[in-house]
Amino acid sequence: MLKITLAILILTLPSISFGHCRITYRVADFPPYMSSEKTGTWSGLDVELAQTLFAEANCKVKFVLMPWKRGLYLLKHGGVDMMSGLSFNIEREKYTYFIGPMRDESIGLVVSRNSHFELTQLEDLKGLPKRIGYLRGVYYGEIFSKKYHSDTQFADKFEAADSEHTNLLKLQNHRLSAFAGDKYNSIYKLRLQKIDHKYKVHNFLLNQNVVYFGFSRASISNVNLKRLQAAYNKLHKNGEFDRIRAKYN
């Protein structure tokens, strides 16, 4: 009788752990990576990659709409379980489990289309006539970060904002020479707003790197972390992530 009871318990353990894999996923309108539909559903490259990961790991997902900076704060404190498109750095690793990489990221500069700035290195940015807009809480890569914190003249060239819309308005009002943003999202938005004949993304990139799925150390259990990592490994190995990314190229 004891053996039968133990066998039943063993058989039921996977379904019990499956029931506890529920992920709150921070999202925002950020095409082509994340887009909200009229039906209330979400789509885009990051969303499709994440949903494929969750399906393989047998995890349920709840989408939570919020700004990037608040998302990072809640990720740190366990208010949300996961964010996508996260660059790795030592500070974030203190509160984040990184799984990936999930895709490439290119950070460029939106400038006036009739500008002719010659930019080949970060040092050249100090020669722009006006300041450069950037977003609070966004990581622009290790090389940029080191220069920003070690070169006062370089740091003074940048002006913080809480939204890309604010940076675009400043550029349109000639208060900025440029503003930093994801290359493909910026191209998408300029075309969507039908202002790509006035503005463009400069060929010079502030940063080009890979980004990751980031899971909160404060809320993700070791069991679910192992489940998600195993799912990622399988999808990476069988080429499913590659097939999804290829649809957006």
Image: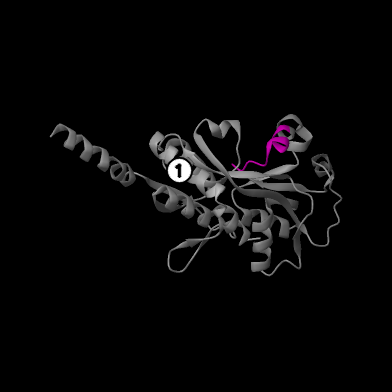
Number of marks drawn: 1
Residue pictured at 65% horizontal, 49% vertical: 104
Residue 185 location, quadrant? bottom right
Image coordinates for residue 99, horizontal then vertical, percent: 53, 41
Q: Let me know if residue 48 is in the magenta part.
A: no
Residue farthest along the left direction in this orientation: 1
Is residue 177 rendered to the left or right of residue 165? right
Residue pictured at 72% horizontal, 60% vertical: 172
Residue pictured at 79% horizontal, 54% vertical: 203
Q: Is residue 184 visible?
A: yes
Mark 1 residue type: Leu
Q: Let me know if residue 137 is in the magenta part.
A: yes
Image coordinates for residue 85, horizontal then vertical, percent: 57, 47
Q: Quadrant of the C terminus?
A: bottom right
The magenta segment is 136-146
The residue closer to the viewer here, 2 or 178, is 2
Residues packed near mark 1 inside 10 Å, few (<14), some (14 to 19) or many (20 plus): many
Residue 206 location, quadrant? top right
Is residue 114 rendered to the left or right of residue 19? right
Image coordinates for residue 133, horizontal then vertical, percent: 69, 48
Image coordinates for residue 65, horizontal then vertical, percent: 46, 54
The residue closer to the viewer here, 215 or 242, is 242
The residue that disc 1 covers is: 228
Q: Is residue 33 visible?
A: no
SS for tag 1?
A: helix
Q: Quadrant of the N terminus?
A: top left
Whether residue 41 is situated above or below residue 139 in the rendered picture: below
